[in-house]
Image (tube, helix red, strand yellow):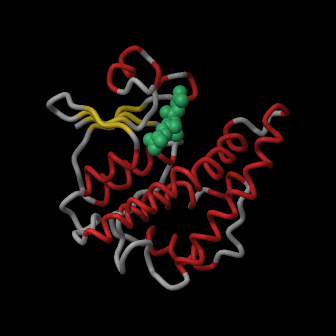
Amino acid sequence: MKIYGDMISGNCYKVKLVAALLEIPHEWVHVDIMVGGARTKELLTLNPNGKVPTMELDDGRCLSESNAIINYLAFDTPLYPTDNYQRAKVQQWQFFEQYSHEPYIAVARFINRFQGIPEERKEEYHSKQNGGHYALKVMDDHLSSSPYFVSDTLTVADISLYAYTHVSHEGGFSLKHYSSIQAWLNRVSNHPRYVGME
Ligand SMILES: N[C@@H](CCC(=O)N[C@@H](CS)C(=O)NCC(=O)O)C(=O)O
């Protein structure tokens, strides 16, 4: 299979990390999102939404949306629970990530790290801080009584949330007051087949 992505993106990193944890052979095709690489004619054929990550299976079928891709890779492995309630819990945290976490933390990171907070995005950057901290507090509270998000072991829900949380300082979010998140980040990165983002 081919995975199209740019490793500066946490959404793409989720796929890279799950493929590494599960030792899934794949061809990584670098797409430079900073120069519109996800919106070329070729990429738009694979994902009409013009975003990466996008996965192309050997038979030509494609899948987009990071959390859908990592779930596909993880079905029938220890990273995806078999219990129906726990499966729904994985989705609960993944929807939380896409709606209440990524739009604040990933966007603030992009504005700061890759754009250097230009004047016209300054207000937007600062407006992301409250929402980001709210999401981090929800996560920290949950992790104060559970080693991982869904069960006692690592699942794709953790990978979905790990991707942008471990680089949240690049969006101006200090994790100093979130000790349970810090311990969880260490748990994830201590996995023997862990790979870093860059
Ligand atoms: N919800 C999507 C978000 C995908 C997305 O926004 N990808 C960004 C990189 S993080 C992208 O491709 N940007 C390039 C562009 O919009 O031209 C997912 O989880 O995969």
155 with respect to 146 (left or right): left
54 with respect to 108 (left or right): left
Where residue 32 appears, x then y in whole percent? 50, 28
Where residue 39 appears, x then y in whole percent? 47, 21
Would you place residue 154 above or below residue 64 in this image? below
Would you place residue 76 above or below residue 119 in this image? below
* Residue at figure coordinates x 27%, y 35% from the top left: 2
* Residue at figure coordinates x 65%, y 71% from the top left: 137
Q: Quadrant of residue 5?
A: top left
Where residue 121 appears, x then y in whole percent? 78, 36
19 with respect to 95 (left or right): left
* Residue at figure coordinates x 44%, y 57% from the top left: 94
Would you place residue 60 above or below residue 177 in this image? above
Q: Compare residues 185 and 133 and report the one nearer the observer.
A: 133
Q: Residue furthest left?
A: 59
Q: Compare residues 68 and 39 and report the one nearer the observer.
A: 68
Where residue 67 appears, x then y in whole percent? 39, 50
* Residue at figure coordinates x 49%, y 61% from the top left: 162
Q: Quadrant of residue 83?
A: bottom left
Count the numbered circles shown.
0
Would you place residue 5 above or below residue 150 in this image? above
Quarter in which the N terminus is drawn: top left
Q: Residue furthest top?
A: 41
